[in-house]
Amino acid sequence: MTQPRRLLPIVGAALRGHFGRSASTCRYRCGNACDHPEPNESDNQYFGDLVQAEVSRRGVMRGGAIGAVVLGGLAAASPAVAAPADPDADAARDVPDAAELGKSGAPAALGFKAIPPNRLDSFIVPNGYDHSVIVRWGDEVLPGAPKFDVYQQSAEKQKKQFGYNNDFVAVLPLHGRDRALLVCNHEYANPELMFPGFTSTAALTVEQWKIIQAAVGMAVVEIERVGRTGEWQLVRNGRRPYNRRVTASDTRFTLTGPAAGHEWLKTAADRTGKSVIGTFANCAGGVTPWGTVLSGEENFNGVFVGANGAPEAAKPGLKRYGFDIANRGAANWDTADERFDLTKNPNEANRFGWIVELDPFDPKAAPRKHTALGRLKHEGANVILAKDKRVVAYTGDDERFDYLYKFVSHKKMRDGRSPSARQHNLTLLESGDLYVAKFDGSGRGRWLPLVKDNASRVEGMTVAEVLILTRLAADKLGATKMDRPEDVEPNPKTGKVYCALTNNSRRGVGTDPGVDPVNPRANNKHGHILEITEDNGDNASETFSWKLPIICGDPADPSTYFLGFDKSKVSPISCPDNVAFDAAGNLWIATDGNALEANDGLFAVPLEGPNAGYLKQFLSVPFGAESCGPFISADGKSVFTAVQHPGERDGARVENPASTWPDGDFAKPGIAVTWKLDNGPVGS
Ligand code: FEO
Ligand code: CA
Ligand code: CA
């Protein structure tokens, strides 16, 4: 057997893609979306000439100030974190206790010393902290999985092993404080970093495509605390009944909600339109108060071919979701499974782009795709309870000039510890109202109903059509075109909602839409954070106020803004992607594609008090990687970070890696935990 050769990393030879991304990231992740016109060609206007004129007058360089002057001035929403169900039925005995999930030993202040921006091929944490790798690509997930050997990989092995390119991370307590289930997404594959001897995607074998389809999806693994520290490790022995791999090739999903069973969802293999094999392009996600995990199917278009041969009637919809309707496309997943050829199976495309709900405490249950939350390039979804206990889910459509959405369930969450309460709560995302955001220049905004009270609010489209072609429906309502809405998450402490707007290379460029108050920077390389305060402190409200607390970039750049905090003290930050909160309500931001020539990282910033806006870099991920997750444990002692695509640089290969993280041989995506050496809460 050939052993991996250890060569010098090709760090210096990195070729640049778009902003901070490598060209290979762009290719495998999103099909070079930046090189194509944005799929949103709708002519819905943004704010009207008056507001545009106001922005021009103030100038883009004062974009931050714009955020500062449009404060909503409304009272914060009341905290709305609810107890997860704790049924006493055997099957659900391990569902986490509400008290455990919400327990706060978390930092009130962020006392760590910021790490400097760097380009090291290491996982860097602040002084006084340590980190370890919990699980990496190829590690055993299903008990008895074959030992990982990159030279002897197969699809059957991969189905039992930890997948590739971990993104979202959630940790749900199991039997108290010292055991937990770690649930993650595996977003996409890097064949050039997975297969020794890689030459081109055209040369991939059927088995290699099958490995790719087995390497994406999701994973559930049992982890245990190390001693009394904030460190966690994989449970490597024993039964581990919850360990699970969800793949693109094998796992059967149930479609729920008003669009399930619609003609557009039926295929030759599924005449019901209610049953789908697989999930992929799973990016961010969220944890529900009833102890399930949500996962967003994002750049699903990238694996299909043959959109040029789809029926003419389907082409406008395909085009709006980024499919190339002019060309067949190069050999892709269809090589191993012809359902990914849209000429043969045009409706297969409609069966992806949903929010997935996985119950990690019921490993036999089919995960579900909820049509009620609409079909888009979902970054993820995060939920909070409205005042009356209906469930509100926020979800972003991650594409240049696409929209921000909100779902409000029809049914209310049930407290209590009975199996029937949990069973009820598992249906909450199956029916509800769906809205899209319209921002007004005055710092106010509205949630425009797409579907409400089981009726379509979009002329000429049925409920099911709105839910399957949600982008086209939102175009008709004149929703606000955003700078790539990524993670959207309510702060459990205040109910205010924070959205990472990653960047937009085309804002105000050529004939593309110009700046507006909520996307105030032309050629927005570094992105910004949006804060939404729902009216009456109720997340079910149809109106809100908004502001921009953070406009990212090098603090020396006058267009940046950090809640008015002294910019000489804050860390540079670029391309915010995933957000999370600690129990004190501090905002944690993970970046993707740092356009400041430094590795991606994780940052933390207080949103209230004297240090509001004092943003500091907490950690950085190895060269070529994106920092994902993040997840801060309820006790505040552990920060979980997914290291996605380490060493992803053009020209990098297994034999010639741009990163050797984490094991010193070749790059493997993995999940790390960071803790404080004194075992106190992070940041303290
Ligand atoms: Fe998978 Fe929007 O990043
Ligand atoms: Ca993301
Ligand atoms: Ca998040």
Image (cartoon, helix red, strand yellow):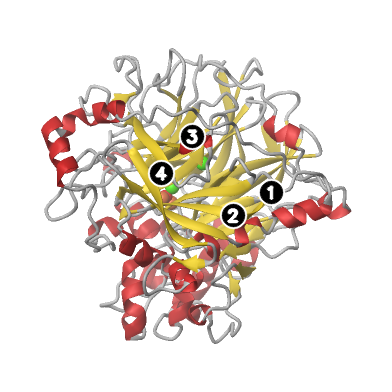
The residue that label 4 is drawn on is 7
Structural distance between the alpha carbons of marks 1 and 4: 55 Å
The label nearer to you, 4 versus 3, is 3
| For residue 409, above or below residue 56 | below
Say whether marks 1 and 2 touch (CB < 8 Å): yes
Instruction: Characterize the local packing of mark 2: few (<14), some (14-19) or many (20 or more) Cα atoms within 10 angstroms.
Output: many
Return the disc, 4 or 3, that comes first in the chain's sequence.
Answer: 4
* Residue type indicated by callout 1: Met
* Residue type indicated by callout 3: Lys
Q: Residue at x 12, y 37 (%)?
A: 56
Structural distance between the alpha carbons of marks 1 and 3: 20 Å
Return the disc, 4 or 2, that comes first in the chain's sequence.
Answer: 4
Return the disc, 1 or 4, that comes first in the chain's sequence.
Answer: 4
Q: Position of residue 381 (x, y in %)?
A: 52, 50
Say whether marks 4 and 2 touch (CB < 8 Å): no
* Residue type indicated by callout 2: Ser
Is 129 in front, or is 211?
A: 129
* Label 2 lies in ligand 3 vicinity (Cβ under 8 Å): no
Q: Is residue 95 left or right of residue 115?
A: right
The residue that label 2 is drawn on is 409
Structural distance between the alpha carbons of marks 3 and 2: 19 Å
Q: Is residue 174 left or right of residue 345?
A: right
Structural distance between the alpha carbons of marks 1 and 2: 9 Å
Say whether marks 4 and 3 touch (CB < 8 Å): no
Return the disc, 3 or 2, that comes first in the chain's sequence.
Answer: 2
Q: Secondary structure at mark 3?
A: loop
Q: Position of residue 259 (x, y in %)?
A: 54, 72
The residue that label 1 is drawn on is 413
Q: Residue at x 43, y 80 (%)?
A: 341
Q: Residue at x 61, y 82 (%)?
A: 272
Q: Position of residue 449 (x, y in %)?
A: 43, 57
